[in-house]
Image (spheres, rainbow, N blue to C red):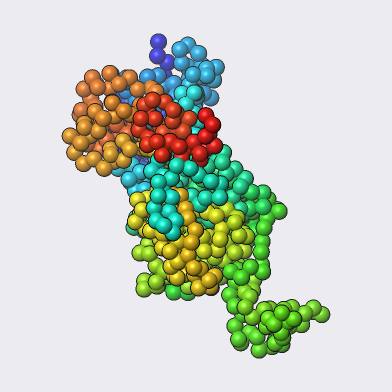
Amino acid sequence: MKVEPKIIEQVKSVLKQFGTKYLTESGELKRSNVINDLDQYDRELMAALLANPLIHDNYTEMIAGTEIFKLNKFIEMFEYKDFWEDSFTKYTDKIGLASGGKFISDSSDVVLDFPYKDTVLKAGMDKEDADPEVGADEPFLNETLAHAEISELLEPKVLINAKRYDKDGEHEANSFDDQDNLIIKGNNLVALHSLKEKYSSKVNLIYFDVPFNTSNDFPYNDKYNRSTWLTFLQNRLRIAKNLLTNTGSIFVHIDWHEDAYLRILLDEIFGKDNLINEIIWHYGSGGSYKNSFAKKHDTIFWYSKTSNYKYFPDNKMVGEKRGTKKRNNMKRNVDEDGRVYYSIKSAGKIYKYYENDLITPDDVWNISILQQKDPERMGFNSQKPERLLARIIGATTKENDLVLDSFMGSATTQAVAMKMKRRFIGIEQMNYINTISVPRLQKVIKGSQEGISKKVNWQGGGSFVYAELMEKNQGYLKDLQKATTFDELDAIFQRMKAGADFDFRVDLAKFEDDPDRRKLSFEGQKKLLIKLLDKNQLYYNEANIDDADVRDLISNSDYQFNKSFYGKESE
């Protein structure tokens, strides 16, 4: 006997107030009507549902002080058909659901987990990750995973197409040294977890230039539902904290759209006592001023992992030279080494400022943005000036320290780190990594003189290793998202049957025989095929690299590189 869950009973009781719009006269759900209106964020329907205590308690969550309606998790109740096994056994074990005669809470076969909460697929950096029906402005989704599969999503992944770039050009890379600089192409959350074992507590500085959620038309996705945006960052910030040394710092760059929400989130993860500075980057030019004061600044939150953080106020890249006008009330001196310095007496103490040194700045940084004709510019809309990153890197790291930026963009952080003789890790999902980011770093190796090069007397040199996360189901996802015809969807599905990993709940034979799926719209069929894929298997896991069906897909050089990178050469 199939027991209707209590949550469905409550939903029906809410829907009755809408007459026959969502229920037939006999009380059966008009599922498509409910789904369509929820997809369109029907305010009246959503308000009525959330007014129900049981629905509210099971389908909302607080993140950074914002209440989130887990809409897609709620919608899943209405979408599953007979080819989805145990269609009513995958929600919450707090409301008495049963599977095989046992309560879910008593079973280890099926558990609740939230891979979409990590926004690995939904609301990713790439616009292709967005749901075609609602675009990027959507809440996160949830899925249920088999118990044995939970950890696979964020296990270390196979790295392919490994190359080494140095002054002699591009070379095949079959090994990796801990002193090597690293660039990874792929989803940054998955990539960060692939670094966890190797780099846990080893990164000295992290800079995150996160999506500002402005809805502007950038190459990457910059239009999120706020709940999705918060969740997107929450999971990346948590793994970032794991990678930091106990004396390390993280700088998170944002503008006025979401700065208040970001600070609450950072307080939760790093602790409000570890907020060192709220830095105002005043960039002078640009900024909107219609019907308001001109907006001419961004905010950079500086948090430390612990109270024992590094700060180097005497570093030459920290501040700007003291201007001549400011020296008028100072006395010019020459020390025993022949260096010129200016001194001023204050409160009984004498302070020295060397002519060639730079002074410690305050928390308002006047650094101009890059102009269109600036030789430093790479044709990247949101590119930051090297001087900005030099100040951050100079204040918190020493030579050979490790700097990480997993929102790499045009590789400003990595370019500055190389010129300042720091080691670096960069991660970027977008394809411009190979047309903008990597070529820029190649120019740096050759001694390009843009940005801070002259200030640090950069003459070229250095190297880095480039590698890509090896796509598995991620490749099928990209193809499905780009499909524009039914024939393309059918062709992709045939390839999926031969090589994809399907969601553990799917009975593929029932799915193929189901006549109703052919009646769905194009977007409906696309969405359904996406749901069939196991989101735990977006990329190949390194643990499976020696399996025959994986090993045959990897070159000998890449195989050796993975063994070296993950420290398994002796296996």
Q: In the rendered image of this protein, does residue 212 appear above or below residue 320? A: above
Q: Is residue 306 visible?
A: yes
* Front residue (pair 387, 457): 457
Residue 115 image point, x, y percent: 46, 35
Residue 444 image point, x, y percent: 44, 63
* Front residue (pair 529, 15): 529
Q: Which residue is painted at 48% across and 42% down in the image?
A: 175
Q: In the rendered image of this protein, does residue 155 appear above or below residue 350? A: above
Q: Which quarter of the picture shows residue 527?
A: top left
**Which residue is situated farthest in the right direction here?**
348
Q: In the rendered image of this protein, does residue 136 appear above or below residue 61? A: below
Q: In the rendered image of this protein, does residue 206 appear above or below residue 71? A: below
Q: Which residue is painted at 64% across and 56% down in the image?
A: 275
Number of numbered labels in the structure image: 0
Quadrant showing the N terminus: top left
**Which residue is situated farthest in the front direction here?**
168
Q: Is residue 26 visible?
A: no
Q: Is residue 527 left or right of residue 361?
A: left
Q: Which residue is painted at 38% across and 64% down in the image?
A: 378
* Front residue (pair 424, 301): 424
* Front residue (pair 527, 367): 367
Residue 498 image point, x, y percent: 28, 26
Residue 303 image point, x, y percent: 62, 55
Q: Which residue is painted at 36% across and 30% down in the image?
A: 552
Q: Is residue 222 left or right of residue 235?
A: left
Q: Which quarter of the picture shows residue 494?
A: top left
